[in-house]
Image (spheres, rainbow, N blue to C red):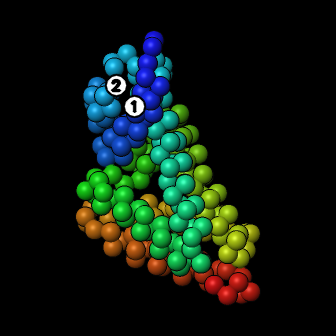
Amino acid sequence: MADDPNTRERILATASGLFQRQGYHATGLNQVLAEGKAPKGSLYFHFPRGKEQLAAEAITAGAHEVRDELRDALDAASGPVAGLAAVAEFLGARLVATGFRAGSPIATVALDIAGESEPIRTACAAAYALWGTEIAERFAGWGVPADRRGPLATMVIAAIEGALLLARVRQEVAPLHEVADVLGNLVRGECGAATGL
């Protein structure tokens, strides 16, 4: 099938946004094609295993996008308080830009279908692991002891995902900033005394 080389990326980006806003079950393939301005046959050409494959790849793509933003926010920060405040800032900006309709690229689909689909569950688990690795690596640079990095990264992810949900429900970004402030101070308390953070 001759196809615009950007069609696959367009379908993936459209699906990612729709899954974030609507969940897996409420997102139809015809809607993905219509909003992505993609020819009907292109979906199964690029995603031969159908909607399940599309969702798993959309989760992976969304997770990498957020990981890159996480990295940029944390790289620019002087320590955990500033770093987690910057994370709250970019996640809040994403929420506001979508009218509080899209939150995490993982959570909506994970809650909707991960218990029923092994490929989607695996993609969600890998996405959270990707974020956890990024955060734990930053913690290492800030002097958090090795045995605390993984558990703290898990706590940060769980708290931020919860804050995203609260922010969507309340239609305000305050929960993200409140959680980031508490987490930043918690992580700072775990940092090695020599860092001065």
Q: Is residue 194 left or right of residue 122?
A: right
Q: Check disc 2: other Cα within 10 Å, few if <14, some if 14-19, many if 20+.
A: some
Residue that appears at 64% across and 57% down: 133
Residue that appears at 71% across and 87% down: 193
Image coords of residue 143 (percent x, y): 71, 76
* Residue topped by disc 2: 38
* Residue topped by disc 1: 11
Quarter of the figure that contains the N terminus: top left
Question: Within the image, what quadrant is residue 185 found in?
Answer: bottom right
Q: Is residue 40 left or right of residue 136?
A: left
Q: Say which element carries label 1.
A: helix
Whether 62 is drawn above or below 95: the answer is above
Amino acid, disc 2: Ala
User: Hey, which residue is sitting farthest top in the picture?
Assistant: 1
Point out the tag, 1 or 2, that comes first from the N-terminus.
1
Image coords of residue 112 (percent x, y): 38, 42
Amino acid, disc 1: Ile
Question: Within the image, what quadrant is residue 2 found in?
Answer: top left
